[in-house]
Amino acid sequence: MTKAEVQQVKLRFGIIGNNDVLLRDIDIAMQVAPTDLSVLITGESGVGKESFPQIIHQFSRRKHGQYIAVNCGAIPEGTIDSELFGHEKGAFTGAISERKGYFGEANGGTIFLDEVGELPLSTQARLLRVLESGEFIKVGSSKVEKTDVRIVAATNVNLTQAIADGRFREDLYYRLNTVPIQVPPLRERGEDVVLLFRKFASDFAEKYHMPAIQLTDDARQLLQSYSWPGNVRQLKNITEQISIIETNREINAAILRNYLPQNNVQRLPALSSGKEGKGFESEREILYQVLFDMRRDVTELKKLVNEIMTERGTAGGASALSSQPYYTSPSQLMPASPVDSNVPTIIHQTTQAVSPVRHQSPMDDDMEEYVEETMSLEEAEKEMIRKALDRHHGKRKDTAQELNISERTLYRKIKTYGLD
């Protein structure tokens, strides 16, 4: 592809930027479009993966056929097979009529499966059959049907890790990943950040009938140095906020900094593992790890206090300890006045799951009366989801984005915990 052809594609599909990796991705999409090869688009949430399946479809022989985009993460697990493959009348409660399904509707066209990593294993098996033979069976039917559909999939999940965890089929991965396209995160696109900001500022100026905001040199530097965990979606959101709120249309670094989160990644600690590709499917493991770490800290603290009291004498040490008031805050596990300067103060940021350490009987020789009470993992998870829903006034899409989970997973959790 020539640079002129790539530039035309960018203009047609509203793609902003001159990053080499991004231009290479566009070139790959153009080259693979005339074929029927499956394409897997990977990249972080908010990088703009949805543009590439449209390019592939519009430059393919299927461009006059149906193009259907399906967000696999937003469809409840119990209905996703029906949505994709259709169902017969009476196949399940509520199936009052026959449904064709997306694979039937898109015959001769293209289906874009966004968040394909969220598909249940049973649905993955059905999808694999379509990829291999073009055959599928409606829910509640025994009749094999055929479809001629080009599949383009996208995910922000690390599928290699998902395969290792048993959450994604390896054979399906290789079928989908015939041609891979890796979309770069915004933090790796250099000056594209400034170009995108300028484009968004211009769009919002037109939308709200006001002058476009401009960046000073120091603001441009800050814009490029920020890590943008939410990628292009986050940049667009912040640009809109500044466009509406700021009366001064020249934005310097001090003003811009007020709109950038202090912590680059704003996620609940119990839902973020700190490892790429570790999603909400492993939140139970993460909660366990948090609780185990906190238990270990308390255990070490008990041993340390016990050693100090043993050195000073059990009676005198117990008397000294019992005379100290205890905080009621679960974030502080030490007396108000430490027994000894060598005793560390342990402060945890994730304390909702652990209640304050209690000293019931300081006269006990073995000091084993420190007892921490942990709420169940289900209760902790339920409380985090409830608070997130409250913050977003029940808007599930915004809540799912904050918790870094799919809408389908959130829907299931809400049903499970009765948070409707």
Image: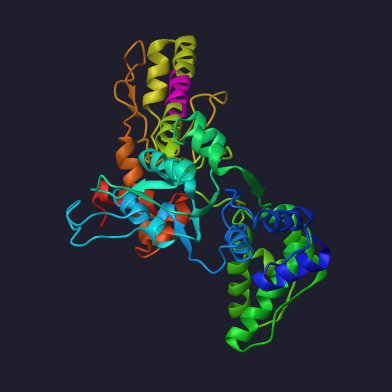
The count of marks equals: 0
> How far from the left and from the top, in percent, is residue 81?
33, 49
The percent coordinates of residue 110 (x first, y second) are 51, 59
| Majority secondary structure in the magenta region | helix
At horizontal 36% and vertical 16% (from top left) the residue drawn is 367
Res. 354 visible in picture = yes
Q: Which residues are magenta?
A: 293-302
Observer-nearest residue: 10 or 297? 10
As drawn, is 15 to the left or to the right of 402?
right
Residue for point 59% across, 84% down: 207
Give the x, y percent position of residue 262: 62, 55
Q: Is residue 202 above or below residue 55?
A: below
Query: Any magenta on residue 403?
Result: no
- Observer-nearest of 66 and 19: 66
Report x, y in % for residue 52.
62, 59
Position of the C terminus, as image quadrant, is bottom left
